[in-house]
Image: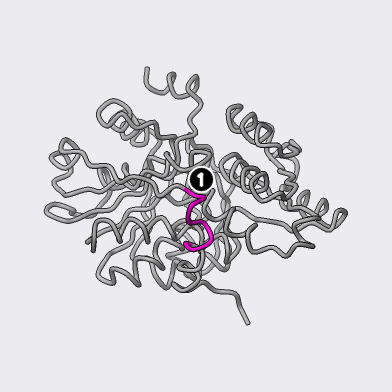
């Protein structure tokens, strides 16, 4: 039977992460509301432990491991936030973690991953496959692979952020969600479809990395070349069969924004709302401001997926 994820999985994940993951705040901005013409609710996952929503899925996945599996550890691959999430979850649960990271990953994310006690193995993403490296290591060590989005327990954990949002603010007309491999989008869409069935869930990708949009329109997985975008957390080349099946079932549309629009949205979040949000984390905000949907007079949820910005890099974007 093909793996899938349902709302009870998200409820169970919420129970596992309760008291460990932060119940992140919901921010408001009268200036944003005036600019977009809507009533916007920002779910601030930049304030989550390790700085991104990824902690939810990682902790939920590792918490479900058997004692024998925990002893043999886990292997993950990530450009940064999933790496830190698995490393921190492993530290909290006593599970040894090995993380395969690209050599060009943001230095702040590599340092943070090592800081949580994980073993980091760097690779050249132009020459090697992170999935193959992780699979080889897992086979050699008897470890469990924890992928960044292609796993039911990861997806269920990510969906808890929308569960919290809707419990706090009530039904929404729209929910805009940052999209890389669509793990967050899948989980959020499942939660929204159960708790607020009238909500239109919109995934937002970088224009240079439109693999999920292409797959959504073709109704089958489409692969693209490695994206060149400042949204390093969304440099995926294809969704998985699992995430695409959930997107096709629960998501209304997938839109894209340019890197320039991302910078504009980041500037607003940093300067006006005093929220440090990384480029990938600003995708949903940019989707509201630049997308094709008329949100005027609507109640709109926006997931700020993370805040692990490299200050030196971002400062150059703002010049």
Counting labels gives 1
Q: Residue at x 59, y 33 (%)?
A: 109
Is residue 207 shown above or below 276?
below
Q: Looking at the image, which is closer to me, 141 or 244?
A: 141
Q: Looking at the image, which is closer to me, 247 or 97?
A: 97
Position of residue 224 measured from the top left corner of the image (x, y, whole percent): 56, 52
Which residue lies under the disc numbered 1? 234
Say left or right for 174 vs 207.
left
Q: Residue at x 75, y 47 (%)?
A: 96
Position of residue 242 measured from the top left corner of the image (x, y, whole percent): 56, 68
Is residue 123 shown above or below 68?
above
Q: Residue at x 50, y 54 (%)?
A: 211
Assess disc 1: are there few (<14), some (14-19) or many (≥20) residues with their C-alpha within 10 Å of its C-alpha: many
Say left or right for 256 vs 172.
right
| View extreme (right): residue | 140
- The residue segment tinted magenta is 14-21
- The quadrant where residue 101 appears: top right
- The quadrant where residue 187 appears: bottom left
Position of residue 275 measured from the top left corner of the image (x, y, whole percent): 34, 32
Q: Residue at x 51, y 63 (%)?
A: 13
Position of residue 122 measured from the top left corner of the image (x, y, whole percent): 74, 36
Q: Looking at the image, which is closer to me, 229 or 277?
A: 277
| View extreme (front): residue | 19
Say left or right for 128 vs 192.
right
As helix, strand or loop, the secondary structure at mark 1 comes to: helix
Query: Residue 19 in magenta?
Result: yes
Query: Residue 289 in magenta?
Result: no
Q: How is the rendered protein coloured?
A: one colour
- The quadrant where residue 306 appears: top left
| View extreme (bottom): residue | 1
On-image quarter of the C terminus = top left
On-image quarter of the N terminus = bottom right
């Amino acid at each position: 039977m093909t793996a899938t994820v349902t709302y009870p999985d998200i409820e169970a994940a919420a129970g596992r992460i309760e008291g460990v993951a932060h119940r992140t705040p919901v921010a408001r901005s009268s200036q944003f509301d005036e600019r977009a013409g809507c009533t916007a609710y920002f779910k601030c996952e930049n304030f989550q432990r390790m700085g991104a929503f990824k902690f939810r899925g990682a902790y939920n996945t590792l918490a479900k491991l058997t004692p024998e599996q925990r002893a043999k550890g886990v292997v993950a691959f990530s450009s940064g936030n999933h790496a830190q999430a698995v490393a921190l979850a492993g530290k909290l649960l006593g599970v040894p973690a090995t993380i395969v990271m690209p050599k060009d990953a943001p230095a702040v994310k590599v340092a943070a991953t090592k800081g949580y006690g994980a073993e980091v193995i760097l690779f050249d993403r132009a020459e090697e496959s992170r999935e193959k490296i992780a699979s080889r290591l897992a086979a050699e060590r008897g470890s469990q692979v924890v992928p960044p989005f292609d796993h039911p327990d990861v997806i269920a954990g990510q969906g808890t952020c929308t569960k919290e949002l809707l419990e706090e603010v009530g039904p929404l007309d729209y929910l805009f969600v940052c999209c890389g491999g669509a793990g967050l989008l899948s989980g959020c869409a499942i939660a929204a479809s159960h708790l607020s069935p009238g909500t239109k869930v919109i995934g937002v990708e970088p224009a240079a990395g439109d693999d999920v949009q292409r797959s959504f329109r073709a109704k089958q997985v489409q692969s693209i070349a490695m994206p060149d975008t400042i949204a390093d957390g969304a440099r995926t080349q294809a969704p998985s069969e699992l995430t695409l099946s959930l997107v096709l079932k629960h998501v209304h549309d997938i839109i894209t924004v340019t890197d320039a629009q991302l910078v504009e949205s980041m500037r607003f979040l940093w300067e006006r709302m005093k929220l440090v949000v990384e480029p990938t984390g600003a995708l949903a905000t940019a989707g509201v401001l630049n997308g094709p949907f008329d949100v005027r007079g609507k109640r709109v949820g926006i997931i700020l997926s993370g805040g692990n910005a490299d200050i030196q890099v971002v400062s150059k974007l703002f010049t």
